[in-house]
Each structure stands twice: as C-alpha cells, then as structure tokens.
Amino acid sequence: MNDTSDINASLMLNNASDLMARQSVRATFKLSVEFIETLSLLATHFGIKQKSLFDLLLEDTESLQDMARLKQSVHTGKKSRIQKTFVISRKSLLTLEALSKELSVSRDDLVESAIQRLLPILLKERLQQKHREDALFKIKARFDQSLEFLDEIEQIVGSDDPIYNFLKTAMGSYRSAFSDMEDVVEKGKRIAELSLEKF
C-alpha cells in the first residue's frame, strides 16, 4: 500500500510540475521587426498559436546553444529592435534565462536565434507561394474558358435544359473552389513580401 501511495503521489507531483511548466506567462523581448513578423506570419500560415510555435522553437536547447556559440556577436547592436511582449510557457522562459546565464548571451539574441531556425521553412514557403501563383494563373485561364464554354452550351440547349443546369452546377463548384484558391494565394503574399535581409 505504501509503495502504491508513493507512486501515486509521485505521479501527482510530476503532473503538477508539468502543468506549472506549461503555464502561460508574459515575457518582453527586444527583437527586429523582421523576426517578429516571421513568427506571426508562420504561426498564422500554419494555423497554430504563436505561443505553441515559440515553445517548439525553444524546446531544442542543443540547437540554440550551438547557434548562440557560433553567433554570439552577430545580432548585438547591429540592427534596430523594438519591444514586443509574447505569451510563452513558463518552461520556455526558464530555459531562456538559464541559457542566457550559461552562455553569457542576452535573451533577445537567443530568441532571435530561435526564430532564425524558421528560415528554411520560410524559404520553402516562399518558393511554394511562387508555384501557387503560377498555378493560379493557369487555373484562372482555364476557368475563364470554362465560363465561355458554359455560355456556348446555353446557346445550344437553352437555359432550361438539364444538361445546361448540370454544367452550371458544376461550374458553381468550380467557382467556389477557385475563390478558395485565390484566398490561399492572397494569404501567402505576406510571406513572399517579407524582407529576409536581416536574417
């Protein structure tokens, strides 16, 4: 009984500790505008919370340590920064503070190093955005042709004929899908326009 009680108590303590680590806290950093925009854009683009993305970036402490050691002086004093308050987990904040002391690197530089790890994803999405824009251009040309084709069929069978109405219904679905495609491409334009000079 005592062993079971000890195990249960230990599990409860671990769970409580995990919950505390995941508790949201506010932390303010001074970051470059490009880094702030990148974090916001990719979180929105992939449909995840900024807090979740932030925490994922800070989980890999080894990568952060390597980047900090290699680039300790890269960001310092070389570009303008603005203050930005983020909601992150208590665990992420504690990790940042521990690494900052261990490596003698500011929390701001560590955060920028973490965000910099998003660069390959950002570059891949920018390339994919170009592909989407090219594809949409071709799709629009075919869509316009389809509208002309619908008019031709109407001239042949009339607007009351079931053949015309079936085709018109299909074109309605096509129009709706095309509108969704336009929304996807429009949404991706912000990523394509993001300046990467300071990465």
Image (tube, rainbow, N blue to C red):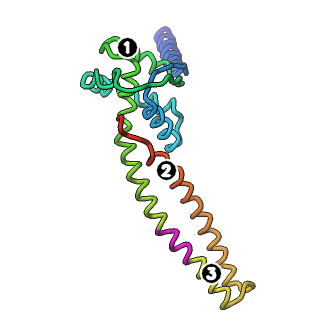
Residue 85: x %, y % from top left: 53, 23
Of marks 3 and 1, which one's residue comes earlier in the chain?
1
User: Can you identify the residue that label 2 sits on?
Assistant: 189
Please state the extent of the stretch shown in magenta in the rendering: 138-145
Tell whether 158 sits left or right of 52. Answer: right
Name the secondary structure under disc 3: helix
- Residue 139 among magenta residues: yes
Of marks 1 and 2, which one's residue comes earlier in the chain?
1
Q: Among all residues in the image, which is located at the extreme top? A: 2
Name the secondary structure under disc 2: helix
Placement of the C terminus among the 4 image quadrants: top left
Eye-nearest disc, 1 or 2: 2
| One can see residue 126 in this view | yes
Q: Residue at x 30, y 15 (%)?
A: 103
Q: CA distance from mark 1 to mark 2?
A: 38 Å
Q: Residue at x 38, y 27 (%)?
A: 79
Crowding near the residue tagged with mark 2, few <14, some 14–19, many ≥20 C-alpha atoms within 10 Å: some
User: Can you identify the residue that label 1 sits on?
Assistant: 98
Task: Say if mark 3 contacts mark 1, CB within 8 Å.
Answer: no
Crowding near the residue tagged with mark 3, few <14, some 14–19, many ≥20 C-alpha atoms within 10 Å: some
Q: Which mark is residue 150?
A: 3
Q: Amino acid at mark 2?
A: Lys
The residue lying toward the viewer, choosing from 97 and 61, is 97
Q: Among all residues in the image, which is located at the extreme left? A: 70
